[in-house]
Amino acid sequence: MTRARAAIGLLVAVQWMTSAEAARADWHDPADVIHGTAHTLEQGQWMIGVFTPVVYGINDSLMVITHPVLWVLLTPNGGLRWRIVESERVTFAVQADGARSFLATETGELRDPRPTGRIATSTLTTFDLGARVLLTVQVGYQHDFLPAEDHLTFSGGVGWVIQPNHLLSLQGGSSWAFNARAVGQTTAMLLYTRAWDTLHLSVGVAYGNFPIALTSSAPLLVPVWPVVDVWWRF
């Protein structure tokens, strides 16, 4: 794995971690908690951050998601989330996304130009448990390219809006590889987010084997990683 490929792996992991808690500054309504839930942005709204992906509300029920840094690393990516059902206590949405890397890989002195990528689809169901607590369950399917593999993906998260500008969350997920018949990487993240108007600061800690390339040899796998992100919603 090259440094660039390892960097993409880490960036995708950080993207997942930080995107779990992107939300509005005024969390008076728990439905304002967007990522990591079945909720969507309002029409015309933007979400932009250092690690948080760019998100735009096409309308009140449909939003588009992409990560510009991955494009710079020759990895086109994008996704859509469509909120289908919204009631007082339950919100249901479907999401589809994909990414493909055109960076070459290296094994010793050999160079492998094959691109890698994935396509995925999932359902998200968010339950408003009252007392400003949200429970979200996500189940989906993911297909990887080169090497080819099919996964059943599953994750869950709990978000607690402590006050309108304080948010605490715990989220985790894993997958099942059909061909390998094995459980994939399991990740978990505890995050606190503080909001000031449109500006947000997220800090926390994540668990999972995140690859860090220090040399041209196999990357170092770091099981615990701090999370810090600054992002805006407007």
Image (cartoon, helix red, strand yellow):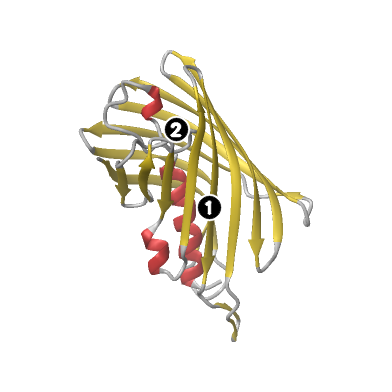
Q: Image point 39% across, 45% down: which residue?
A: 227
Quadrant where the N terminus sits is bottom right
Name the residue tied to disc 1.
97
Given residues 7 and 59, the one toward you in this image is: 59
Q: Image point 41% across, 65% down: which residue?
A: 71
- Report whether 107 appears left or right of 78: right
Binning the other alpha carbons within 10 Å of mark 2 as few (below 14), some (14 to 19) or many (20 upward) gives many
Name the residue tied to disc 2.
39
Q: Quadrant of residue 172?
A: top right
Q: Quadrant of residue 145?
A: bottom right
Given residues 17 and 84, the one toward you in this image is: 84
Whole-percent x, y for residue 49 in the image: 31, 49
User: Label 1 sits on what residue type?
Assistant: Asp
Secondary structure under badge 1?
strand
Whole-percent x, y for residue 107 in the image: 61, 79
Q: Image point 59% across, 38% down: which residue?
A: 123
Binning the other alpha carbons within 10 Å of mark 1 as few (below 14), some (14 to 19) or many (20 upward) gives some
User: Label 2 sits on what residue type?
Assistant: His
Looking at marks 1 and 2 on the same chain, the residue that comes earlier in the sequence is marked by 2
Given residues 95 and 35, the one toward you in this image is: 95
Whole-percent x, y for residue 135 in the image: 52, 25
Q: Quadrant of residue 124?
A: top right
User: How far apart are the two marked residues, 1 and 2, measured between alpha carbons?
Assistant: 16 Å
Q: How many discs mark residues in the rendered view?
A: 2
Q: Image point 40% across, 26% down: which residue?
A: 31
Secondary structure under badge 2?
loop
Circle number at residue 80 = none
Quadrant where the C terminus sits is top left
Whole-percent x, y for residue 5 in the image: 51, 68
